[in-house]
Amino acid sequence: MTRLETATPPIAAADITPAESIQADFVSHLMHTLGRDCYSATLHDRYLALALAIRDRLIERWVRTQQTHHRRQVKRVYYLSMEYLIGRSLGNNVINLMMEDAVREAMGDLGLDWVDLRDEEVDAGLGNGGLGRLAACFLESLATMQIPAMGYGLRYDYGIFRQAIENGYQVEKPDDWLRGGNPWEIARPDYLVPVRFGGRVEEGRENGKWVARWFDTKTVFGMPYDTPVVGYGGRTVNTLRLWSARSSVEFGLEDFQQGDYIAAVQTKVAAESLTKVLYPDDTISAGRDLRLRQEYFLVACALHDILRRFKADGMPWQELPNRAAVQLNDTHPALAVPELMRLLVDDEGLLWEEAWDLTVRSLGYTNHTLMGEALEKWPATMIARVLPRHLQIIHEINRRFLRVVSAHYPNDPDRLRRMSLVEEGPEKQVRMAHLAIVGSHSTNGVSHIHTELIKHRLVPDFHAMYPGRFNSKTNGITQRRWLLKANPPLADLITEAIGDRWITALDGLESLAPLAHDAAFRERFLAVKRQAKAALAGYLQCKSGYRLDPGSLFDIQVKRLHAYKRQLLNVLGIVIRYNRLRRSPGGDFVPRTCLFSGKAAPAYALAKLLIKLINCVGAAVNNDPAVDGRLRVYFVPDYRVSLAERLIPAADVSEQISTAGTEASGTGNMKFMLNGALTVGTLDGANVEMHDEVGDENIFIFGLTADQVADLAPSYDPHACCQTDDEVREALDLLFSGHFNFEEPGIFEPIRRALLDDGDRYMHLADLRPYVDTHDRVDALYRRPHEWARKAILNIAHSGKFSSDRTIAEYARDIWHVEPCPIEASTEFESDP
């Protein structure tokens, strides 16, 4: 018999160890919750049983956290985001509960591998990239710092698509992440929220007061599902509440009895499609309509829930900003401005002026982009059809706002046009960023350079009018996920050297700096890096058949595919290196493995073509005898949090090469830095602050600055870059000669046009020579492993600023004005943080 067959819960419960307690609950859940025995249980069943055993421990602390917050009548942070890129939860929860040793022992005694069980979990991919991952990091930091908070989002049935590669092309497949069940969530049908769409508005006087009534609407219900979010040390457990759409009409019995089976369920299906998928295709009208409905659905459910909680405490309305800090993560939840006004004016009967004061003081807005095409605008006709009362409110906000602008800047119609919430034109558009700025007391950028560009380029008129509302909050990452969990060997090495203070105070990594000059410590760091590279090589060999040499330099670019992130610049550099290898097959070159990963939006044709290009270049390079393995290029499919946790620890070089002035911040750059990769990057986003922290000699900065990009843009000629540089011209000639795509001639013509005929909007060719020269410096340094290790250790030592704990502390102090609420321990198995 196996140990699992004979396992039974210990009799003397009071005397059992944490490992025995976990083991007993695991066995109990396997049998009594899942109805499995040791013979029928699959690996997934065993994962579920362990997850439920861990959830039991979370729930006790969760309930105590909520009771404490309610009893002390604390001010809460409410974080509204359309995306939460959570990844896997079991490993992170076990680490934050400080139970990993106990779980490993408990499972080991049953003959089970803790890591195998942990890795059985499916990623919760409810986000596309940095925006959603930032939201997940923020929730973890809020709990770790014991700040009362709730995250609000949507419980998409299908998350960001699962990416497959077929013949080099991206193929999107459904991400049915709920198929195997989600043990972390708890449904809350008692908090069902009605959300209305469509209809018409009637206005008139009632009891001497002007009122508006919204009639003939169609209702969809929001069903909340709660997930506990535990902070490190296990004391505070906050909540992520995700909303799922439910029909107000379950079943058309009359249609069914008359044989019209489709009609019997079509209302239910149409309503519940609202939260079916993340990011519907917005290149078609139906997709844009659905996206607008999704954004309002989130806002309506969240604000209803916030006000329900506020009213239950019996507070006067003037106390709302002192009890609720509502943060809008980008423009997606910007409809919170008219919705909160509607609730306060229409439903609660407040006067406009009082409601507006409460709205502005309660809401904060985070801007995440500088690019016009990414700043949401919705056709006024669409809003009128979907949310007629909200369009009225937006127009009234705009009328009153423009009256104030006119008073500040008389006789300036151009300024009024620029600042209006409604953009005039053949089709009037509501500018959601303008709405969010006007309707909130704080607008923050996510890095210093990004904030300055917001103030002086994106919305200078608003900054001139409301200078006190603009502030910078550089993004951050949680070190618990991105070092303690993702890279245990490096985490252990650091803790052994300087202690574990860094886990909750990342600036403690400064103590590593002297060890960068210690040869023995550098050797140990290099051994840890080799271990991570070998682990990645083994994983990719098993999963994809890729052959990686752990002794080569691992050069990694992982992020969503977009022209401004410049994966194409990386490819052009690779082609130049490839040409050098072909010209000098016997030359002394540093072996290099170039890895790409990331997803392209399904409707973004050029980004999808870049994936094909990377795969075609890789196929040619990897199979060319002249290269002889000294250069390998691979695209790793289906980028997600759990894959990032494997790729990032193994990186020697981190590619952060966006055109200066386009990346708001980036957080991948911080994750690589924390794990000891050296950055090759432009002075863009948080790269600027990374450069300030680590010093010019410990980071590879190249290319045009944001100011230089702006100055060059009017006269930039990409053809001139080719005419004056033989290597650049030869690389382009080879790339577009058909060498890499002889079986599919002409497929890369759109890329050639974007680079040469259409002006190279993101200035790849202007930065290509500096980029290539910088990589020559990278090669020279890599030949000196101890000097490389010294710089890598210094990068880790100076990464303390980039913790999401620091970011959250700044939000709490400057924007939300909230304080930590310590939660007392109450069981013998709870550890002090």
Image: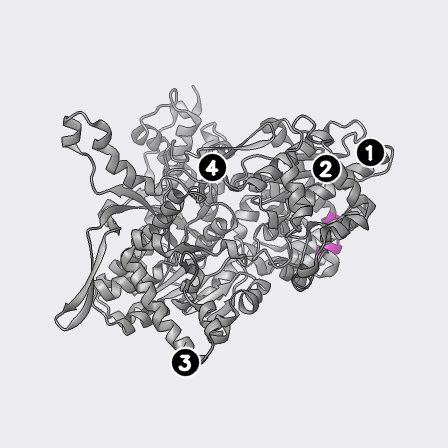
From the image, state whether disc 2 or disc 4 is nearer to you.
Answer: 2
Query: Amino acid under label 4?
Result: Phe
Which residue is nearer to you in this view: 40 or 696? 696
| Residue on which disc 4 sits | 161
| Residue on which disc 2 sits | 735
**Which numbered circle lies on residue 407?**
3
Query: Amino acid under label 3?
Result: Ala
Q: Which image quarter holds the N terminus?
A: top left
**Which numbered circle lies on residue 582?**
1
**Separation of residues labelled 2 and 4 (CA atoms):** 30 Å
Query: In the structure shown, which secondary structural element does the residue marked by tag 3 occupy?
Result: helix
Q: Is residue 237 above or below residue 344?
A: above
From the image, state whether disc 4 or disc 3 is nearer to you.
Answer: 3
Q: Toward which corner of the image does residue 210 lie, by quadrant?
A: bottom left
Query: Amino acid under label 1?
Result: Arg
Range drawn in magenta: 515-522
Asked if the residue at tag 4 contacts the one at tag 2, i.e. Cβ–Cβ closer than 8 Å, the answer is no
Residue 131 horizontal side relative to residue 24, left or right: right
Examine the rendering and report whether any part of residue 694 can be seen: no
Mark 3 nearby-residue class (10 Å; few <14, some 14–19, many ≥20) = few
Query: In the structure shown, which secondary structural element does the residue marked by tag 2 occupy?
Result: helix
Mark 1 nearby-residue class (10 Å; few <14, some 14–19, many ≥20) = some
Q: Is residue 830 above or below residue 355?
A: above
Queried whether the magenta region covers residue 796, the answer comes back as no
Q: Position of residue 759 (x, y in %)?
A: 66, 51
Q: Position of residue 819 (x, y in %)?
A: 40, 66
**Separation of residues labelled 4 and 3 (CA atoms):** 50 Å
Asked if the residue at tag 4 contacts the one at tag 1, i.e. Cβ–Cβ closer than 8 Å, the answer is no
Q: Position of residue 88 (x, y in %)?
A: 46, 40
Query: In the structure shown, which secondary structural element does the residue marked by tag 4 occupy?
Result: loop
Asked if the residue at tag 2 contacts the one at tag 1, i.e. Cβ–Cβ closer than 8 Å, the answer is no
